[in-house]
Image: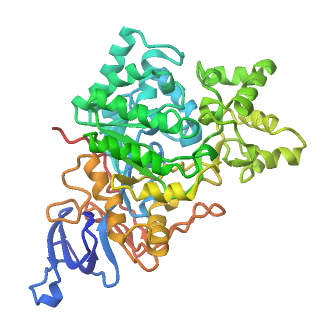
Amino acid sequence: MDLVIRDAEVVDGTGDPSYRADVGIEAGRITTVVKEAAAAGCLRPVARRVLDAEGLVLAPGFIDMHAHSDLALLRDPDHSAKAAQGVTLEVIGQDGLSYAPVDDRALAEVRRAITGWNGYGDDIDFDWRSVGEYLDRLDRGIAVNAAYLVPQGTVRMLAAGWEDRAATPQELDRMRQLVAEGMAQGAVGMSSGLTYTPGMYAKDAELTELCRVVAEYGGYYCPHHRSYGAGALEAYEEMVALTREAGCPLHLAHATMNFGVNKGKAPDLLALLDKALASGADISLDTYPYTPGSTTLVAMLPSWASEGGPDAILERLADEDTAERIRHHVEVVGADGCHGVPIEWDTIEISGVNDPALAPYVGRTVRQSADRRGEAPWVTARRLLLDDRLGSTILQHVGHEENVQAIMRHPMHTGGSDGILRGDKPHPRAYGTFPHYLGRYVRELGVLSLEECVAHLTGRPATRLRLPDRGLVREGYRADLVLFDPATVAAGSTFEEPRTLPTGIPHVLIDGRFVIEDGRRTDVLAGRAVRRTPR
């Protein structure tokens, strides 16, 4: 064989108790799992290389169910932000906005719309237009594997533009066609960002029709739903009802209960989900193990202010009367972009800017910067939006630890970083989600057992993605594996130093090849596009 990992403590991704074993790998697959080989006096596997894993846990590679690495995978061949965490597969195309399918117009618009997530992409050759062409581009070699969700907001942008109205029958037919083509070309499902324009302009009937198409191809629907603040429970219930009518599996993106109105309400969400599951619904969810959220500053605006796309937003912000209307909705009414809750500027921390001249704002809340300038917070926020051409990213400190812990215990829970990799001070979840689960919530707090946590991060997401040979340590499965020290594994990233790499993860393999070896990134690009498994 190519490699034998000897005397590892195998946590196999099923949730079952761990066991000691030798694991043999050949041609990118696990070929042998010999339990208790040394103690039983078995004939031990022989290979060209033997790795002594004494004291280390061997687990399937972690699956990041909510990633924003759509351009980072092409821009940064190192991609240690994820590889060093033990992530071997990311699910991208999230929150309804990404870069395929597009035409020339839609590509230019989406690049501007999510420049805060991924940068504008001046360093990228956008030599694709369809979902299949984008996946082919990933197949040229990337740091970790990637699966793709058809982004419903981009589809709507392509078929109906940025207008806040119902789609015409012809436009809906075009959207159905685009989703069907994306699924046929290998997407694993469809995402939405229902607090982001233009996806949020879709009514339930439109979304239901698109979900029917997704279900026909064996995919799932992954919505960032209409509110995580005021009316959050109703927004979750809306997604459950919608997908049940469509006959489509549901995966709830970053399933949090945020803002003061939802303090202590995680049990209400879980009761809602348990009732639906008991009646036959197919539901899963992902979360990150932190309290603050992260998005763009422009996302806080009301949807009416965003109609027409980025240029229209900037025009409205530049007009004094319209800007005052926006301020009133944001600060007094509670904009739908801010989940129906009046914004609290001392919770909005600027995490990144496109224009280097605006760097002094980074690491401070909007209120702190406003106080330093002797002006109202809205004046500061408006200036940032205009001067940075909508490119500023934020941390939003509105979460509750008791909700985070309650939701991660749910049996249908999976892990997702929701990590934005841009900005001088990105959310530490981008670099730390998976070791933070293992170090903080397993070893230190005991919220999850080690076996249960690994299942949440490996086997369960693989089941949702319908991957027949990933997510478990099992003979015949792909050798996407991580070895970590359960006594020392921890996130290195903090809110002060968010790009620090984790500790206690010495080895990561993709397709049987070391992408992290002895704690260092190799030059291996073993990642490829992971396409939907046909029914």
Give the image location of residue 480, x and y in percent.
28, 61
Q: In the image as oriented, which residue stretches furthest toward the right?
A: 374
Q: Is residue 207 above or below residue 456?
A: above
Give the image location of residue 297, x and y in percent.
66, 38
Q: In the image as oriented, which residue stretches furthest toward the left?
A: 43
Front one among 374 and 392? 374
Give the image location of residue 23, x and y in percent.
20, 74
In the rendered structure, the answer to whether residue 524 lies left or right of residue 394 reads left
Q: Is residue 76 above or below residue 341?
A: below
So how many labels did they put on this image? 0
Where, by quadrant of the figure, is residue 393 drawn? top right
Q: Is residue 412 above or below residue 53?
A: above
Front one among 146 and 282? 282
Taking the image as drawn, is residue 127 in sight?
no
Front one among 24 and 332? 332
Where, by quadrant of the figure, is residue 197 drawn? top right
- For the point 34% across and 79% down, the residue is 56
- For the point 64% across and 54% down, the residue is 425
In the rendered structure, the answer to whether residue 152 lies left or right of residue 514 reads right
In the rendered structure, the answer to whether residue 488 lies left or right of residue 179 reads right
- For the point 44% across and 62% down, the residue is 434
Quarter the N terminus occupies:
bottom left
Taking the image as drawn, is residue 416 in sight?
yes
In the rendered structure, the answer to whether residue 160 lies left or right of residue 21 reads right
Give the image location of residue 316, x and y in percent.
71, 20
- For the point 28% across and 33% down, the residue is 248
**Display colour scheme:** rainbow
Quarter the C terminus occupies:
top left
